[in-house]
Amino acid sequence: MKRPQVLVLTGYGINCEYETAHAFNLPSVGGEATRMHVGDIIAQPQQLERFHILAIPGGFAFGDDIAAGIVLATKLRYRLERPLSASWYPSGRDRRSVAAGSHAHRQ
């Protein structure tokens, strides 16, 4: 059985990316996680095509001074909305988020 490919976002104050990747890589979970900086995904959104799961870890995105995850969510929405809408959401791929990542996910 092919292991699902998991994209774990990193950067801009996001933390827990190592722990999140480790959790997906556990044999009982069966994923194959890759950590990648948000800026790299924005620069080359076609990279999203090879992943089945998008994980947004928690942390202090953009310092958490403004509101947890809102700046990150805005960045994701305006820079990745088209690539995500075109291929990710219609395919039923999964999204998971933790802590501040949950705020970004809900925005």
Image (tube, rainbow, N blue to C red):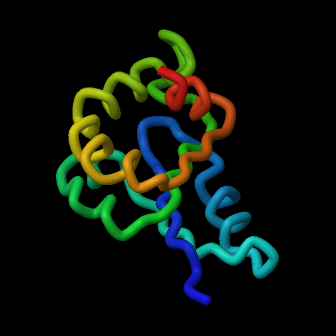
Residue at the spot 52% in from the left edge and 31% down from the top edge:
105
Looking at this view, is 106 or 20 the one in front? 106
Instruction: Give x and y (percent) for residue 2.
Output: 56, 86
Residue displayed at 23% across by 53% down: 45
Judged left or right of residue 69, residue 81 is left
Residue 49 vertical position relative to residue 73 in the rendered view, above or below: below
Quadrant placement of the N terminus: bottom right
Question: Quick check: 64 left or right of 24?
Answer: left
Task: Name the residue furthest left.
Answer: 43
Q: Nearer the viewer, residue 63 or 67?
A: 67
Q: Is residue 37 depicted above or below 52 in this figure?
A: above
Residue 30, how many percent across, how many down?
69, 77
Residue under the point 54% across and 44% down: 56
Residue 49 at x, y percent in the picture: 31, 64
The reply, left or right, for residue 50 in relation to residue 14 is left
Front residue of this view, candidates 87 and 69:
87
Q: Residue 8, position in %: x, y?
A: 51, 56
Tell how many labels: 0
The answer to whether 3 is drawn above or below residue 21 in the figure is below
